Structure formats: structure tokens, C-alpha cells
Image (cartoon, helix red, strand yellow):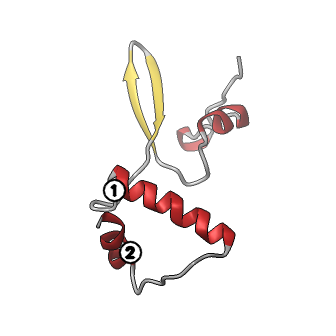
């Protein structure tokens, strides 16, 4: 089990194997709680309100990414809101 040393200002370094296993990158926000004399750290993922697509929209994004890889792109959007509106239609 890896050992972690507390340094100046209470800072710790998470071992690389932990960061890799949880896909934790520099600058990522972790939620911390104390439970039964243990410190529990959980990586957080923030999603901008209104940016979550329906399953239909997600499928369209998947298809669009495949088209981009093939070089078969036929439509450009002026902004993200226009693209999301089209994806949800």
C-alpha cells in the first residue's frame, strides 16, 4: 500500500497509480469527506447546466464524430446552441 506524506500547508501528492486508476488530472477538483476516521476523496465532474444531451442527441453526436473521422462533414454551426438544437430535433 503506497504511503503519502503530508507536506507544507497540509498538501499531499496522490500516487500516480491512484491518479491513473481514477483518471485524475492536474487541476481537477476532488470532493473530500471524513467518514469513520478516514479521509475519502472523490473526483468531481462538472457539467454546464443545459449541456446534457438526450440519448437521441448523444447518438447523433456519435454519428457526427464518425462522419468527421471519414471526412464526410456537410454542415457547420455558428455556435454550440445551434448545434445542440439541431441534435435534439
Question: Looking at the figure, which quarter contains the N terminus?
Answer: top right
| Residue drawn at x 36%, y 54% as measured from the top left | 56
Residue 14 can be seen, yes or no: no
Q: Give the image location of residue 65, x and y in percent.
A: 57, 64
The residue identified by callout 2 is 83
| Residue in front for this viewpoint, 11 or 44 | 44
| Residue drawn at x 52%, y 61% as measured from the top left | 63
The label nearer to you, 2 versus 1, is 2
| Residue in front for this viewpoint, 26 or 12 | 26
Q: Give the image location of residue 58, x and y in percent.
A: 42, 55
Quadrant of residue 59 in the image? bottom left
The residue identified by callout 1 is 52
Secondary structure, mark 1, is loop
| Residue drawn at x 67%, y 67% as measured from the top left | 69
| Residue in front for this viewpoint, 75 or 24 | 75
Q: Is residue 29 positioned above or below 84 on the image? A: above
Q: Give the image location of residue 15, x and y in percent.
A: 69, 34
Q: Is residue 34 positioned above or below 88 on the image? A: above
Secondary structure, mark 2, is helix
Looking at marks 2 and 1 on the same chain, the residue that comes earlier in the sequence is marked by: 1
Residue 71 can be seen, yes or no: yes
| Residue drawn at x 39%, y 23% as measured from the top left | 34
Amino acid at each position: 500500500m503506497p504511503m503519502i506524506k503530508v507536506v507544507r500547508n497540509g498538501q499531499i501528492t496522490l500516487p500516480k497509480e491512484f491518479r491513473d486508476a481514477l483518471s485524475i488530472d492536474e487541476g481537477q477538483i476532488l470532493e473530500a469527506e471524513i467518514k469513520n476516521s478516514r479521509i475519502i476523496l472523490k473526483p468531481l465532474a462538472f457539467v454546464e447546466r443545459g449541456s446534457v444531451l438526450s440519448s437521441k442527441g448523444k447518438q447523433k453526436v456519435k454519428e457526427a464524430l464518425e462522419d468527421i473521422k471519414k471526412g464526410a462533414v456537410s454542415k457547420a454551426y455558428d455556435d454550440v446552441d445551434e448545434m445542440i438544437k439541431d441534435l435534439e430535433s
